[in-house]
Image (cartoon, rainbow, N blue to C red):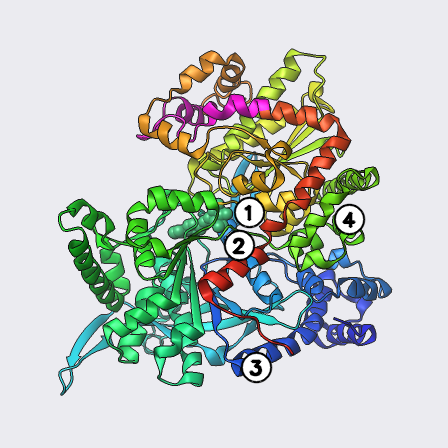
Amino acid sequence: MKIDKVKFKEGVLGRLKRHYGKQLEEASPQEIYSCVSDTVMEPILDNWLDTRKATFDQGNKQAFYLSAEFLMGRALSNNLVNLTAEDDIKDVLAELGVDYNLVEDRESDAGLGNGGLGRLAACFLDSLATMDLPGHGYGIRYRYGMFQQKIVDGYQIEKPETWLNERDPWGIRRADQSVVVKFGGQVIIHQDAEGKEHYIRVNSEDIKAIPYDTPIVGYDTKTVNTLRLWEAESVSGFDLQLFNDMQYQRAVEKANSAEDISRVLYPNDNGPQGKALRLRQQYFFVSASLQDLVGNYKKKYGDDFSKFPDKVALQLNDTHPVVAIPELMRILIDWQKLPWDVAWSIVTRTCGYTNHTILSEALEKWPIGLFQQQLPRLTMIVEEINRRFVEELRLKYPNDYGKHRHMAILSDGVVKMAWLAIHGSHSVNGVAALHTEILKNQELKDWYELYPEKFNNKTNGVTQRRFLLKANHGLSQLLNEKIGKGWAKDLSQVTKFKAFADDPAVIQRLIDIKKANKVALATYLKATQDITLNVDSLFDVQVKRLHEYKRQMLNILHVMYLYNKIKDDPTYQGVPRTFLFGAKAASGYRRAKNIIKLINTVAKVINNDPRTKGKLAVYFLENYRVSLAEKIFPASDVSEQISTAGKEASGTGNMKFMMNGALTVGTLDGANVEIAEEAGEQNCFIFGLKADQVARLTQSQAYNPQAILEEHPEIKKAMNQLIDGTYNVESFDLFKELYDSLMYGVEGNAPDQYFVLKDMPEYIAAQAKIDEAYRDQKKWHRMALLNIAASAKFSSDRTIGEYAKEIWNIKPISWK
Ligand code: 26Q
């Protein structure tokens, strides 16, 4: 888009005067950020209105991504990139004497998600808009997103994330489009003169849902889609009756409980939390979204719902929005008066379900009593769905009672949301090839046998606009020069970069770019966290949520092993290394928090030992989040993707590293399998048990960690240092629980459930190979180039193309 620089300047200066009564010289970076953003909104708004009109007029089918999480990160710089106006705006600000980076850094991340699943939703929105596809997001406008992490004395401390303390210039409140969501109460069945049943809701708790719309700007195109996030408010504001009765405090409390619903994001990734508030959050945004969407449908098609599945596709992002299935049934039956079978056919043709996890503890199950208490009408509908389904099961598998009970949607006192999702959708997909196979052959085997046609794979992807074009200017520039600019919109073109693998000048450019990115990261970390990085060392990076299955433990044990080598051998000649960790632990996940403390404790000892100077350093980066990730990927040499095989559904950080020329050290898990396939195993460092070996070893219970220690004294030594005072100066017991969980198992679990020690010898060997490879910088960066050139598959554009064609059947908006 062509920006009128003079108009833009006037826009910013005018707003500073109007909103803050200030001239540019007096304005703070925060105020400038706010006014620059408002000015950038202008051209976006025009395209947004045009997009809405075009989709309505063209009457195309639209997709809606229902997700409890959207991990959007920052908007200003991303919108400028997608408007292809970044350089122009930088110029204008420079002319005004304003430092763009300072302004950009004033924006808080919209951290409305935990990790992979939420960031995937954000990447999908970017791809949909860029590909001119009519696809929108629906979710919750949490007042507090993912907590801010502080490290105090090596421990994680959570602080509330205050992203809304400054106003959000990107979200537009649309109070006129509010809807009411009802909880609790009773359902009265009323028979009319013709004997038809009507369901009347009494004594319900009514909560107002107010939408906030954020524009999703496509890259280098007119399309601007919508992310609609709902905020909860008490219907009456205050309960005036209570207020008049002088029960002021109770009136305030009641308003609070309504507003509790959108107050805070649950901060656990892949963990169980069967609390009422979580179910209320889910129903709140799902009911509001469906009311909204059905209302819009009726504006165009009236009461003829036969076309609904041809006009609307709903994608359920994990089990979190699965109440959409009974809620849509309720709307079609109670409001539209459709017969059950007609309604069920519409629902199943409209919904698709994506599974993001194999960990059984993350599959949501709601106690039936809780479900009944919060959602009495939906409970009746779920009971009827279950009754009909179990009847089908009995016919199909007459004597297999175990199967009836296992597959029942409602049994053992719980509503099984994953089962409801599979039964109520026409499509069930996993997020990487291996993950989908494991679902089909193991976790969802019975369901795959019943509904083989529903199952399909959609390997995840990431947007190269945010994570390469915007994050890594040096590499983007090099790609533009060598293969043209087309890759930003069509990553399949990056394959052309392979032709430069043996061009020494290009390899040298890669070396220089990586170095410059390390310097930039070092400068940022010095300023924000007072960390001094050795930019001449190999950057070995593991950034992702802290979870046992992701095995940060394996990484830190290897660091401890390396430290021992350095101490034992003064002539140690290993490649200088900096290990970087970034990870948030769920606030109630004790062991994960202990691992953070361990990393920090080890870091402190190593970084303060003169013997490691210039050889080894370890840092835990505070508050890992999208905006920090964008600075880390471009500066990384090694990408740690070391989960226990079979446990990481896909991973998406692995793809962001690859695009930025980091080499993967990883297990054959999730999308790593496909990364190794695309790049060639000779260009990755693959190690460890395969998924089927993990499954068999778990089954057989033949694994004994003690045996590993006996065979590998160097591993035994590192393990003993967890409990012998080498690191834990304050208290010898600090890491005893971690030690016990690996050696003996605790709380009824098998020892070393995630096979950290089992995989450690091979991991050490893989790391030694990395050392060797890194010594030859030309060879190393040739491998990096081959990874970059092989990353085409991992664009979320490719993924969204597949969803659009194979699940949603949606077509691009035509801009003529
Ligand atoms: C569930 C119930 C109650 C409270 C919270 C939750 C909850 C919240 C978030 C459960 C799971 C999540 C997030 C899961 C997640 O991020 N999964 C990741 O999804 C990525 C995108 O598909 C994959 O790449 C990762 O492998 C997968 O771990």
Q: Quadrant of the C terminus?
A: bottom right
The image quarter containing residue 24 is: bottom right
Identify the magenta region: 736-765
Question: Mark 2 highlights which residue?
Answer: 120
Q: Mark number for residue 274?
A: none
> Given the image, on which type of amino acid does mark 2 rest?
Leu
Question: Mark 3 highlights which residue?
Answer: 53
Determine the secondary structure under disc 3: helix
Circles 3 and 2, Cβ within 8 Å, touching? The answer is no
Going by the image, does 807 lie left or right of 374? right
> Given the image, on which type of amino acid does mark 3 rest?
Lys
Determine the secondary structure under disc 2: helix
- How many angstroms separate mark 2 from mark 4 (CA)? 25 Å
Determine the secondary structure under disc 4: helix
Determine the secondary structure under disc 1: loop
**Magenta-drawn stretch contains 743:** yes
Going by the image, does 231 lie left or right of 506? left
Q: Mark 3, residues whose alpha carbon is within 10 Å: few (<14), some, or many (≥20)?
A: few
Q: Is residue 730 visible?
A: no
Q: Mark 2, residues whose alpha carbon is within 10 Å: few (<14), some, or many (≥20)?
A: many
Q: Mark 4, residues whose alpha carbon is within 10 Å: few (<14), some, or many (≥20)?
A: some
**Magenta-drawn stretch contains 524:** no
Vertical relation: 352 (above or below) 438? below
Label 1 CB sits under 8 Å from any ligand 1 atom: yes
Going from the N terminus, do you reach mark 3 or mark 1 first?
A: 3
Label 2 CB sits under 8 Å from any ligand 1 atom: yes
Vertical relation: 547 (above or below) 725? below
Give the prevailing secondary structure in the magenta stretch: helix
Q: Is residue 495 visible?
A: yes
Going from the N terminus, do you reach mark 4 or mark 1 first?
A: 4
Position of residue 300 measured from the top left corner of the image (x, y, whole percent): 45, 84
